[in-house]
Amino acid sequence: MADLGVQFAGIHFRNPVLLASGTCGYGKELQPLADLSRVGGLVSKTITPEPRAGNRPPRIVETPAGMLNSIGLQNPGLEGFIRDQWPFLSGLDTRVVVNIAAPTAEQHGEMAARLEALSGIAALEVNISSPNMKDGGMLFGCNPAAAAEVIGAVRRVTRLPVIAKLTPNVTDIATVARAVEEAGADGISLINTLLGMAIDVERRRPVLGNITGGLSGPAIKPVALAMVWKVRRAVKLPLMGLGGISTTADALEFILAGATAVQVGTATFFNPGAAVEITQGLDAYCQRHGVGRLASLVGVAQV
Amino acid sequence: MLDEQAGVIDNRPVAEGFYQLRLAAPAIAAQAKPGQFASLRVSGQPAPLLRIPLSFAAADPQGGTIELLYETRGPKSSLLSRVQIQQTLPCLGPLGRGFGRPAPGQKVVLVGGGIGLPPLLFLGDWLRQRGHAEVALLAGARSAAKHLPGDLLRAAAPQVRLATDDGSLGHAGFVTDLLDEELAAAPGALVCACGPHGMMAAVAARCRRAGAACQVSLEEYMACGFGVCVGCVVEAAVETAGPYSRYRKVCVDGPVFDAAQVRWEED
């Protein structure tokens, strides 16, 4: 068996395949269908300072090779998460990255400070990229200065590794990546969903209750890959690549483009075992190609 | 909850646009309850991407088979209608929470519209097998051709009443007209409904006025079917525990809900 372990921002992951935020709940829901001890880690669903109801339905619609969602960060809030979700999550035999979002930079800092009190968190992933949050998320991630302000506020209060999750809905993602690097991020995950919409032609109105949503799934994979490639050349930080990864080959493309780790998201919806299958596939690939350490493949696709 | 490779035993049209699919899925068949559902992957990805969720129309734990009835109304169900005997399909189930049990001797009125009937057929058969005799099935459809075969309906309930929008079979009008008569005769009945949203809203309103208990099996766009995407939500009648309790997941909190716990549009 090949060594699939990777070091990411000072954290050792037994393999580079994580479950993406918003696609694995708080672990409990997925556990009956996927052996979580066989993935590198999971990123818990975004929590906000206060509980949120989320957007009005419909929240989901399938599109060619993809889907739109407009969940709107329905979540139990920071304290509800700590009380009801963390005890289970912290008992899992896998690395847990906690994803946070808030309406202000200061509140991001407050959340990070509160989470600092828990033991067992591998890292914080800061969601400055949700297209479904009207008071934060992508509003920060679209603006390099605002993105840096949020990451700086988190950086100042925590010793945990800080991962900035970036939005693709920008003119130049490299500029935002450089801004969060300068603000003290330890890593970057990219990409969040692409803003999109669908219209029901029979009823002549938008399908989603929120009108617009975030596009995910295989349809966005080439876009995500190009952004990983571009950001790899703009910053020194380790990257977590995500966006449409459904197969071993998809994961390898991101690794070869320069991602130290990858996240599997939408694929889990139609194939709950997708992430575990990809870890097996990576091992088989390494053996087939005589690769002793998977980490040696990071960024080797060169021109 | 299991992800089982289900073998196709039979897949045939049973009414205009409706198909009956029988699958060998012993582990799921052993656990399936009326109102629960399965989620089938009908092609490799990337398109169609997501699974198709379908309520159980029957489950035979001894024979190890499940039965699903579906209407061809989109790419996934059209693809499913072309699936051949002996093919296998990844099948996730049983998912969700099913119907609650009636009190001993309580009259049960099953109210189904269109493709909402399958979970009610399973429930009717389940009750019959457990010696619950007081069951009526009220089935509505757009036209006679859209009605499921009579033998399927009669297997679910000793008393079957039909309605069609165009009057081509049974009562000319809505199935809810028939419900009014049933509720007048048996005000303490348990009503179990599944069908178009408007029909269920009307059923819920009638039951509320009559003081009858009502359970509804709801449908929403679904990405995962097991509670992680939080896409398939329905608004609760009241927020019992703050904003986080406003929307409930059809896939794990339902698909069967007490109608009084759901916020209907005309409320």
Image: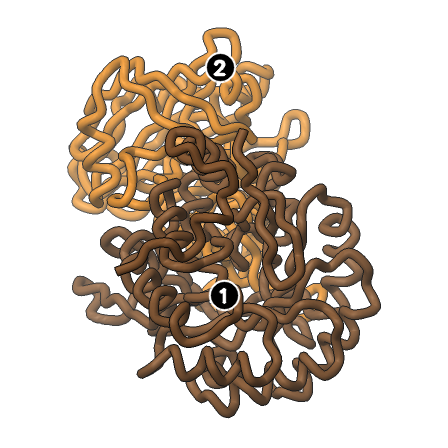
Chain colours: A brown, B orange
Q: Tell me if B231 is positioned left or right of A86 in this view.
A: left
Residue B39 picture location, percent across and down: 41, 35
Q: Is residue B161 above or below residue B179?
A: above
Q: Is residue A150 above or below residue B260?
A: below
The reply to whether residue B220 is visible in this rendering is: no
Q: Quick one: A268 or A154, which is closer to the camera?
A: A154
Task: Check disc 2 and report the residue beneath it.
Answer: B26
x and y, in percent, of residue B237 in the image = 59, 63
Res A72 visible: yes
Identify the chain of the residue marked 2, using the numbered disc in the image: B
Q: Quadrant of residue A10?
A: bottom right
| Residue occupying image coordinates x 68% and y 80% | A155
Distance, label 2 to label 1, CA atoms, is 42 Å
Residue B251, horizontal then vertical, whole percent:
51, 46
Going by the picture, which residue comes out furthest to the bottom? A145
Residue A189 numbered tag: 1
Mark 2 or 1: in front is 1
